[in-house]
Image (spheres, rainbow, N blue to C red):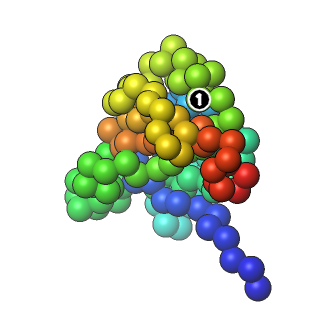
Amino acid sequence: MPASLIHIALIVRDYDEAIAFYTERMGFTLVEDSDQPDQGKRWVLIAPPGGGTLLLLARAATPAQAARIGDQTAGRVFLFLRTDDIWRDYHAWRARGVAVVREPQRMAYGVVAVFADLYGNRWDLIEYAPDHPLARW
């Protein structure tokens, strides 16, 4: 059976503030928001514009989890979002108040900008060069 990465868990402080940020500022789509009363949590999935792997917004349930909010990868870029038009998305995100960590830069593989989400997690926004293998992936 072929396998694919379908969800990535992202630890958040509050479901509703995270849903608002990702949908209103970053243009994600809320795919599912189901109450899980027996577990005291919600199952919240959001999709990036254009589809792809979904993010599971997982509210921190312990002090150890709460300590990792915004720092799931020890300050490294955590998530990588491919775009077909970096300037469109860069300007839209800035206009909606998404924090820019590094302005767009041309690299050998394309153009990349670094943003931070509402918790400080770093994201690469990448437009791959047309001849790069990931431009067609």
Residue at screen point 32% across, 38% down: 120
Can you say whether 113 is above or below 3 in the image? above
Residue 123 location (% of width, % of height): 44, 42
Residue 129 visible? The answer is yes
Q: Helix, strand or loop at disc 1? A: helix
Which quarter of the rendered picture does the C terminus lie within? bottom right
Mark 1: amino acid: Ile
Pick the front one: 18 or 42: 18
Please indicate whether residue 116 sits to the left or right of residue 3 in the image.
left
**Local crowd size for mark 1, using a 10 Å CA cut-off: few (<14), some (14–19), many (≥20):** some
Pick the front one: 36 or 2: 2
Q: Quadrant of residue 114?
A: top left
Residue 37 location (% of width, % of height): 54, 61
Residue at screen point 55% across, 39% down: 110
Residue 47 visible? The answer is no
Please indicate whether residue 84 sits to the left or right of residue 55 in the image.
right
The residue that label 1 is drawn on is 86
Q: Quadrant of residue 74?
A: bottom left
Which quarter of the rendered picture does the N terminus lie within? bottom right
Number of labels in the image equals: 1
Pick the front one: 60 or 52: 52
Residue at screen point 54% across, 55% down: 56
Can you say whether 58 is above or below 17 in the image? below
Can you say whether 104 is above or below 78 in the image? above
Residue reaching furthest to the top? 95
Residue reaching furthest to the right? 1
Q: Quadrant of residue 83?
A: top right
Residue at screen point 54% across, 18% down: 91
Can you say whether 75 is above or below 87 in the image? below
Residue 7 location (% of width, % of height): 59, 62
